[in-house]
Image (cartoon, rainbow, N blue to C red):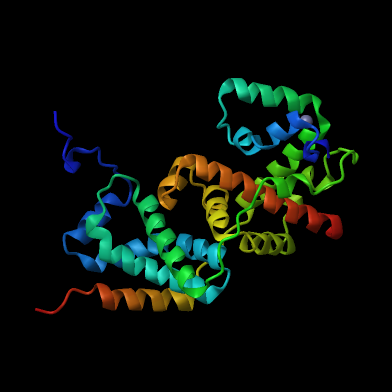
């Protein structure tokens, strides 16, 4: 038997399907509804990835322009939201390549292992035991955002997608076009990196 | 922390798996193994708690709303681009 043609693949129906079909059938004025649904999500993704408000705005605009350009090619094989993030992720990576030439730094597990002197009293620090609602304040959120921005981009994107935007390992792998194993490795290192920064903050701040 | 001490090899092996453990992505046997170790090793337990709290903070960090001026500009730009050409 030959492979099934693409049209026989299961189509994923979500809340956006109807709207997308309307846009693709020529009702392009409905595109603004799609923008309304996702502008806030993408803006936050942009702020987390680029930090700077102006860069985030550029990313949102370029992503929607690309979405409009390629919407006819969307085959409903994933949720629209995941496809949208895939477009946003590649738009983001292309943009940043253009703006800076520094090679990406790799994070190794070892750098998180050697941080403390062995034999130090092992106990759960206070900050890990305080309920989140008591811990969270503007300063801490700022510290966290700064820490995320200081991660190398490939790690930053993984932790943003997994722990801030709520995508699964599989979805993150699809969005970034990397393997699930790679997502897990990068995620663990990114989390350890952030944990170090938070430890530093609480060592001086509490 | 002993879990950060390279000499403590067992802890070190677990250190690599803590994220997958938190995300419930380990096979059940390995999951149980980590669980049992963490229950009796204070160093690894401290590691686990700080990592969990880090993740919880990321999840709760909140969203900004889109600046109104940008949203207006965005819709205007996209509207002019997506308008079908006049016949
Ligand atoms: Zn241990």
Quadrant (top left, top right, bottom left, bottom right) of the C terminus of chain A: bottom right
Residue A156 point in image, percent of width and height? 57, 57
Residue at x 80%, y 24% (from the top left corner): B40
Residue at x 90%, y 41% (from the top left corner): A120
Quadrant (top left, top right, bottom left, bottom right) of the N terminus of chain A: top left
- Relative to residue A10, is residue A125 drawn left or right? right
Number of callouts: 0
Please say if A10 is above or below A162.
above
Q: Nearer the viewer, residue A206 or B23?
A: B23
- Relative to residue A40, is residue B2 drawn left or right? right
Residue at x 44%, y 74% (from the top left corner): A58
Residue A132 appears in the rendering: no
Residue A62 point in image, percent of width and height? 38, 70
Please say if A75 is above or below B78.
above
Residue at x 26%, y 66% (from the top left corner): A69
The picture quadrant where one finds residue A10 is top left
- Relative to residue B46, is residue A18 drawn left or right? left
Residue B83 point in image, percent of width and height? 22, 74
Residue B33 point in image, percent of width and height? 67, 22
Please say if A85 is above or below A30.
above
The picture quadrant where one finds residue B84 is bottom left
Ligand 1 placement by image quarter: top right
Q: Nearer the viewer, residue A157 or A82?
A: A157
Residue B17 appears in the rendering: yes
């Amino acid at each position: 038997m030959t492979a099934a043609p693409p049209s026989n693949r299961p189509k994923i129906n979500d809340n956006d399907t109807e709207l997308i079909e309307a846009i693709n059938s020529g009702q392009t004025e409905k595109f603004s509804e799609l923008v309304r649904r996702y502008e806030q999500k993408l803006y936050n993704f942009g702020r987390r990835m680029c930090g700077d408000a102006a860069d985030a705005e550029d990313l949102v605009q370029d992503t929607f322009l690309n979405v409009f350009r390629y919407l006819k090619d969307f085959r409903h094989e994933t949720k629209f939201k995941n496809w949208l993030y895939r477009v946003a992720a590649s738009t983001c990576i292309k943009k940043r390549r253009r703006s800076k030439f520094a090679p990406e730094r790799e994070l190794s597990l070892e750098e998180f292992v050697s941080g403390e002197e062995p034999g130090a009293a092992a106990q759960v620090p206070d900050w890990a035991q305080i309920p989140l609602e008591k811990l969270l304040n503007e300063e801490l959120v700022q510290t966290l955002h700064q820490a995320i921005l200081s991660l190398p981009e490939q790690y930053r994107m993984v932790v943003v997608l997994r722990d801030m935007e709520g995508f699964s390992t599989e979805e993150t792998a699809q969005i970034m076009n990397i393997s699930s194993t790679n997502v897990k490795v990068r995620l663990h290192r990114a989390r350890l990196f952030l944990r170090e920064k938070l430890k530093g903050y609480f060592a001086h701040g509490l | 922390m002993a879990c950060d001490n390279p000499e403590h090899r067992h802890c070190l092996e677990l250190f690599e798996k803590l994220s997958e453990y938190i995300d419930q992505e380990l096979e059940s046997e390995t999951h149980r193994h980590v669980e049992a170790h963490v229950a009796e090793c204070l160093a690894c337990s401290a590691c686990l708690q700080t990592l969990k709290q880090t993740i919880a903070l990321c999840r709760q960090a909140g969203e900004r709303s889109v600046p109104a001026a940008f949203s207006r500009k965005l819709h205007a730009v996209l509207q002019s681009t997506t308008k079908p050409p006049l016949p």
